Amino acid sequence: MIYSDQLLEGLLRNAAIANGYLPPSKLDQSYDEEKSRIGKKIFEASLMSFNSDTSCKSCHLKEFSSADGLPNAVGVGGSGEGHERLMSDGLIVPRNTLPLWGRGAIGFSTFFWDGKVQRGDGQLISQFGDMAPSDDPLITAVHLPFVEIREMVVDDQTVDENYKDETVSSARKIMDRLIAKLAKDELGQELAISVKKNKDELAFIDVATVVAHHIKNQFALGESKFSRFIEASEMKDYLLSIILNLQ
C-alpha cells in the first residue's frame, strides 16, 4: 500500500510538472509599491463607477476568494456581500464574477470567461480592436469593467444612450467622464503624483495601470497545499537519490 501511494504521488507530481507547473514564487510579476497602493484605493472607490455606487471591490472580495460567491454577479445598485447582495436591488450581470488570484502572474495572458482579451500569435485581441489602450493584456482587461453596462454603468433612463451603445467611442466617453470626476477628488492628485503627471494630464490608462499593479500585488499566487505537495515530493526524491547513491 505504501509503495502504491508513493507511485500515485509520483505520477501526479510528474503530470503536473509535465503540464507546466512552476512554484508560485516563480510566477510573481514585479510591481511598483506606490502604484499598487494607489491602485488599491481606486479598486475600492465607488467614485470610479459611472453612477458612483459600485467599486471593483463590490464583486472581488477576499472572503469569496477574490470573487463574490454568487452564480451571477450583481452590479450597479447592489449592496452588501454574498447572498445579501443577491437579494438587494442591484442589476444582475449575466455572467459569473472572475476570480483575480494569479491574473497578474507571469504567463497569464487570457482574461474573462470568454477570452475576450488575450495575447496570442504576437498580437493582442480585445474589444478595442486595433485601438487597444495597451499591449499588456492585463492593463487592457482592467479597462473593461468600468465601461460595462450593468456592471459599473447603470442601464436605465438616467444614463444618456450615447454612453450605452457599447462601442469603443462610448467606452472612451465613459472613461473621460470618470477621469473628470477623479481629477476633482483628492485621489486624483495621488494618482497624478504616482504616475508623475499633472491632474489635468491624467488619462484612463493611468487608472488601469495602477489597478494592474494592485492586482499583481494583492492577488499574487501564494503557497498552497498542492505546491507544498509537489515540493515535498521533489525533496523526497532528492533524498532518496542520495541514499541510493551512498549504498
Image: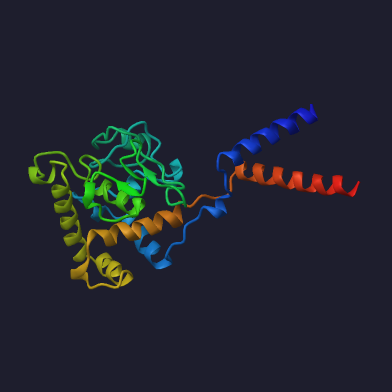
Question: Can you see residue 42?
Answer: yes
With 150 as the anchor, is 15 left or right in this view?
A: right
Position of the N terminus, as image quadrant, is: top right
Q: Quadrant of residue 70?
A: top left
Task: Find residue 152 and report its horizontal and vertical position in percent.
Answer: 24, 45
Q: How many marks?
A: 0
Question: Can you see residue 41?
Answer: no
Tell which of 218 and 104 is nearer to you: 104
Task: Find residue 44 and report its horizontal and vertical position in percent.
Answer: 33, 54
With 1 as the anchor, is 192 left or right in this view?
A: left
Q: Residue at x 22, y 66 (%)?
A: 202
Q: Is residue 179 above or below residue 244?
A: below
Q: Residue at x 76, y 48 (%)?
A: 238
With 167 as the anchor, is 67 left or right in this view?
A: right
Q: Residue at x 40, y 47 (%)?
A: 109
Q: Is residue 203 above or below residue 152?
A: below
Q: Extreme right residue here?
A: 247
Tell which of 141 and 44 is nearer to you: 141
Task: Find residue 54 and report its horizontal and vertical position in percent.
Answer: 26, 47
Task: Find residue 90 and report its horizontal and vertical position in percent.
Answer: 25, 37
Tell which of 173 and 236 is nearer to you: 236
Colour setting:
rainbow
Q: Residue at x 36, y 31 (%)?
A: 71
Q: Extreme front residue here?
A: 121
Tell which of 216 and 111 is nearer to you: 111
